[in-house]
Image: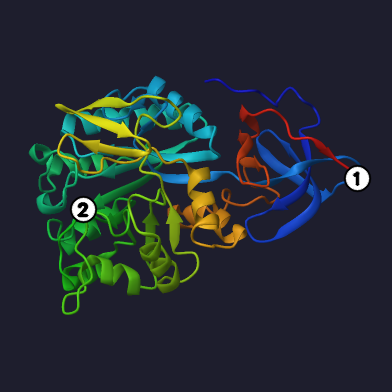
Amino acid sequence: MNRLSDQGNTNNVIAVSSMFDGNNWHRNVQLSWCAGVITDIRPAAGTVLNGILAPGFIDLQVNGGGGVLFNTAPTLATLNTMVQAHARFGTSAMLATVITDSVALMQQTADVVAQAIAAKLPGIIGLHFEGPHLSVPKKGVHPAEHIRPLSAAELALYQRTDIGIKLITVAPENVTPDQIKQLTAAGMQVWLGHSNADAATVQQALAAGACGFTHLYNAMSPLTSREPGMVGVALTDKDSWCGIILDGLHLHPTAARLALAAKPKGKVVLVTDAMSPVGTDDTEFAFFSGKVKRDGNKLTNEAGALAGSVLDMASAVRYAIEVLDVEPGEALRMAARYPAEALGCADNRGQLRNGYQADMVLLDAQYRVQQNWIAGNSFYKAPPPGPHK
């Protein structure tokens, strides 16, 4: 793993002109850390860096990056590359995501994530199974030949306790409420997506323990006047989380504003659904038996369907601020604190507080990443900003 280690620096201190701690803004702050954990936050004395220190971003849905795709090459080297690619854009923690595939491939990805968790690989906190228990009519680019009902083989895989945070996206018309209860009993977070379910079926899934919606609006039954669909339930349910892809392609700005207006604060989280080209100039990549091509920031398969994104978390934050007029602190919460709350790891991630992991991102005034730390180690550093007296 390429990292710029700070552990040899006995000071482990940064002083900045502005800090957002996940709750509030502070001016001229000095933050210290030791062994990857924040140990002290106090007013700065003397020269400070002219920038914004914020909690490192947490991404629930990362299929790839740096030229590699987890489904295609489920190895520790792939996870290393993904972490490094996304660290450039402020991500300090992610769920490696495997889309609909064979049981054997799913087991292989779980084995690799278990190795990463055991080795404390920085940045990898768990695994997101996006499929295979989805709806064929709303499959998107998921391969139809691998979409299937939940069986004992998958359930045994989902019951593993060595793969960190476990999240699964299912279509509730193909996974029963009793099966959702089984999944939650196994420690899985059940999110709903790639579904053509009616509102009643979605509500039954929520009552059984489902707690979120994967890439809201995309690949799910729409809101209509007499059938609210999955979108209608997602927007009106006050307890569930919704992931949104703010790349300007997956949803219209008005649809994004509607979600932010409808959901309680804290229930909308930024996700990338990132594919292999993130952090590269790649213009195409192999995807199962076909290819996905890139045109600017748009990824499509050979049929012209959207196939994930080349979005990064810092760009999603900027889109929220610049296009949706979201207050900057709220945009940063949507990228860090709220995902930590959604994933149940808010007791040590998503905020800059004493005792929390030293996952931090230094941003300039335009919210571009200048430096990123994971557990106190610098994984990316741009040319440094100038000093500020």
The residue that mark 2 highlights is 194
Place of residue 341 in the rendered image (x, y in percent of width and height, measured from the top left): 49, 57
Q: Residue furthest bottom?
A: 226
Q: Residues within 10 Å of mark 1 (few under 14, many from 20)?
A: few
Residue drawn at point x = 33 percent, y = 48 percent: 167
Residue closer to the observer: 275 or 128: 275
Residue drawn at point x = 14 percent, y = 26 percent: 289
Place of residue 32 in the rendered image (x, y in percent of width and height, measured from the top left): 77, 40
The residue that mark 1 highlights is 45
Secondary element type, mark 1: loop
Asked whether residue 321 is in view, the answer is yes
Looking at marks 2 and 1 on the same chain, the residue that comes earlier in the sequence is marked by: 1
Q: Residues within 10 Å of mark 2 (few under 14, many from 20)?
A: many
Asked whether residue 358 is in view, the answer is no
* In the image, residue 258 above or below residue 301: below
Q: Amino acid at mark 2?
A: His
Place of residue 285 in the rendered image (x, y in percent of width and height, measured from the top left): 27, 25
